[in-house]
Image (cartoon, helix red, strand yellow):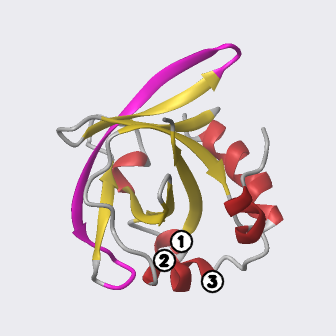
């Protein structure tokens, strides 16, 4: 996978600096369509995150598909096939980072553990790219934002 220009700069940032960047961004009015995922952040996180997702049932995570009604689904790459797994809901709501609006992605209770305890927050990085921060609602990871990008497929 080719690294996007946005990721080249973001991969030089510390994990904590993503919250400071997130605060400067605006919420998209809505998210709709297919978005390709890209891991960003320190090298250790870009190495650990894809492997950790395999352990949590989202191995091969490559994006999200959002419908106009706020429903969505995660996209997983398995060989030459895209699998749709683990439904989500997205809605405009206050961010846990700064209380300002962002698109909040939640995982309904139909998803296996730990996904109902995970929240993704999205803000607009540029016209086609969202900066996402993943938070766990419990445990030691509750205050640690795990960054990623979503690039809109056009």
Q: Which residue bears the numbered disc 1?
A: 145
| Mark with earlier residue (2, 3) | 3
- Residue 79 located within the stretch drawn in magenta: yes
The residue carrying pointer 2 sits among few (fewer than 14), some (14 to 19) or many (20 or more) residues within 10 Å by Cα, namely many
Hey, which quadrant is residue 99 in on the image? Answer: bottom left
Which disc number belongs to residue 17? Answer: 3
Element type at marker 2? Answer: helix
Element type at marker 3? Answer: helix
Name the magenta segment's main secondary structure. strand
Residue sitting nearer the eye, 111 or 11: 11
- Residue 23 located within the stretch drawn in magenta: no
Q: Give the range drawn in magenta.
A: 78-98
| Mark with earlier residue (3, 1) | 3
Q: Is residue 107 above or below residue 148?
A: above
Task: Give residue 80's position: percent from left, percent from top.
Answer: 68, 13
| Mark with earlier residue (1, 2) | 2
Viewer-side label of 3, 1: 3
In contact (CB < 8 Å): disc 1 and disc 2: yes
Which disc number belongs to residue 22? Answer: 2
Task: Give residue 121's position: percent from left, percent from top.
Answer: 39, 63
Quarter of the image with the N terminus in it: top right
Viewer-side label of 1, 2: 2
Task: Give residue 147's position: percent from left, percent from top.
Answer: 58, 64
């Amino acid at each position: 996978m080719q690294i996007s220009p946005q990721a080249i700069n973001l991969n030089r940032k510390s994990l904590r600096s993503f919250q400071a960047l997130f605060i400067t961004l605006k919420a998209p009015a809505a998210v709709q369509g297919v978005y390709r995922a890209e891991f960003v952040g320190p090298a250790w996180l870009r190495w650990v995150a894809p492997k950790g997702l395999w352990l949590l049932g989202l191995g091969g995570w490559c994006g999200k598909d959002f419908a106009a009604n706020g429903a969505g689904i995660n996209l997983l790459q398995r060989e030459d096939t895209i699998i749709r797994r683990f439904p989500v809901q997205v809605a405009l709501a206050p961010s846990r980072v700064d209380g300002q609006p962002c698109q909040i992605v939640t995982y309904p209770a139909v998803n296996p553990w730990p996904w109902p305890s995970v929240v993704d927050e999205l803000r607009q990085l540029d016209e086609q790219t969202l900066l996402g921060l993943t938070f766990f609602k419990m445990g030691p990871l509750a205050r640690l934002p795990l960054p990623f990008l979503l690039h809109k497929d056009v």
